[in-house]
Image (cartoon, rainbow, N blue to C red):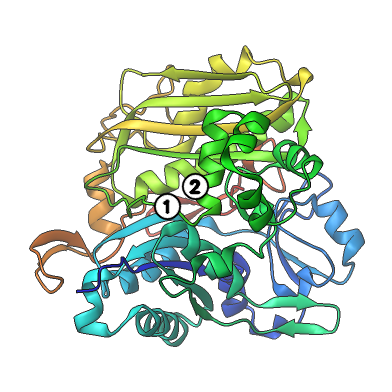
Amino acid sequence: MSEYRTILHVDMDAFFVSVEMRRHPELVGQPVVVGGAGTRGVVAAANYEARRYGVFSAMASSKARRLCPQAVFLSGDYAEYSKVSTQVHTIFNQFTPFIEPIALDEAFLDVTGSAHLFGDGTAIGWKIKEQIQNELDLPCSVGVATSKFIAKLASKKAKPIPTSSGINQGHGVLRIMPGEELNFLHPLPVQALWGVGPATLAKLERLGVRLVGDLVELGEETLVRAVGKAHGRHLFALANGIDDRSVQTARDLKSIGHEETFSHDITDRVAMRREIVRLTDAVSSRLRAHDCAARTLTLKIRYSNFETIARSITPGSPLASAPAMVKALDPVIEKIDPTIGIRLIGVSVSGFVEPVEQLSLLDFGGDGSEQSAGTARTSADLEREWSPQVRRSTRFGRSLERTRSIPQVLWLRPVDASWDNPRGVRVKKNLGMLCLRSCSL
């Protein structure tokens, strides 16, 4: 067996739009946006034809229309995206049981032990890409490396590139060979490093740092003086290609979190809550992927002056859905003053347990926790409807229980996360249960 790990980062290309294009093949070649078309709408995803005009996710829909008046706007269908994500993960499971879902459209895979079955990392990457394309008619890009950090950068480099003259197809699968990490990493802009937001970038630029290689030449001691001890050491390690984090499956996961540093400080309560809802939705999506609930919920806020606060709460019952998490956080959110400027928001959960019985989609306890109700179906009921049977597998060198697809439990999103109608959501009947028709950010 190789002395190096083989880590894949699989990232679906314009996932929401690609799913919609399967249902609307007449739109192939046209700029398409998934998101709210109203004055307060937000772009959730844009295909590469739309990106040629500068349209990207998280952009206000009004701005997207100005940049690309001919763009076709489609409302989101989160239930369908979750269903397709499950199908994608079913394919992943054919190659390795060691999968760390990041969102509906991306995941890390450790395929170190799969080489004797499927070939090296490049071969496995192409097999996964081709199988997803052939079976699901969806494109994806794959990065292959010895670490999660380099693999994620490689998958980004492998993606199609929109230009003014057209769309250049990327590598599709890009492997950074062991020993070549620094040659790949050092010519990249320094903001490619995780943790380099606008404020850190400004400090580094004042020191003459433009590329990752410049940061290495600056030296760890100078970097620590400039950005702080913990942050400086973190960036210096990444700049040298050092990332020992393992792919975290449900068996060894300690916490799940998402945080984001914003290009412009958030100064109003509506925008702050919208970002909290979006991050909470991403966290709950990963909780569902791991089929677990969490006892502790933490909200992290970093102000423009770099003051950082973190508030943790432990409701009476474990949390699994985004609406319950947001409701539980409401008392904390109300005490936060965004007017001084918020540069980073993070949401994380910990203390994992088995999912408990859930209320109906429209009912939550007063403390934000999900509680049982006589008429509600349990999470086990939902799993039986949405997930194939768990089976035992020994093909990857060890015996373990694993699912052929990821159980998905669909919930109504809070009104602030709706695209077209921030004061309400649209729902439909699907297989006897209510499913979300508008996708959260």
To which residue does mark 1 refer?
243
Foreground label between 1 and 2 = 2
Q: Is residue 429 left or right of residue 71?
A: left
In the image, residue 32 lies at what x, y percent?
Answer: 73, 71
How far is mark 1 from mark 2, CA to CA?
7 Å
Tell me the kind of residue under disc 2.
Ala
Q: Is residue 105 visible?
A: no
To which residue does mark 2 refer?
237
Secondary structure under the numbered disc 2 in the rendered image: helix
**Residue visible at 74% across and 36% down?**
199
Q: Is residue 323 above or below residue 386?
A: above
The answer to which of marks 1 and 2 sits earlier in the sequence is 2
In the image, residue 143 lies at what x, y percent?
Answer: 48, 71
- Residue 119 position by quadrant: bottom left
Q: Quadrant of the N terminus?
A: bottom left
Q: Is residue 295 left or right of residue 346?
A: left
**Residue visible at 78% across and 45% down?**
205
In the image, residue 22 lies at what x, y percent?
Answer: 57, 79
Q: Badge 1: how crowded within 10 Å, few (<14), some, or many (20+)?
A: some
**Is there a contact, CB below 8 Å, between mark 1 and mark 2?**
yes
Q: Looking at the image, which is closer to me, 104 or 357?
A: 104
Q: Is residue 85 left or right of residue 343?
A: left
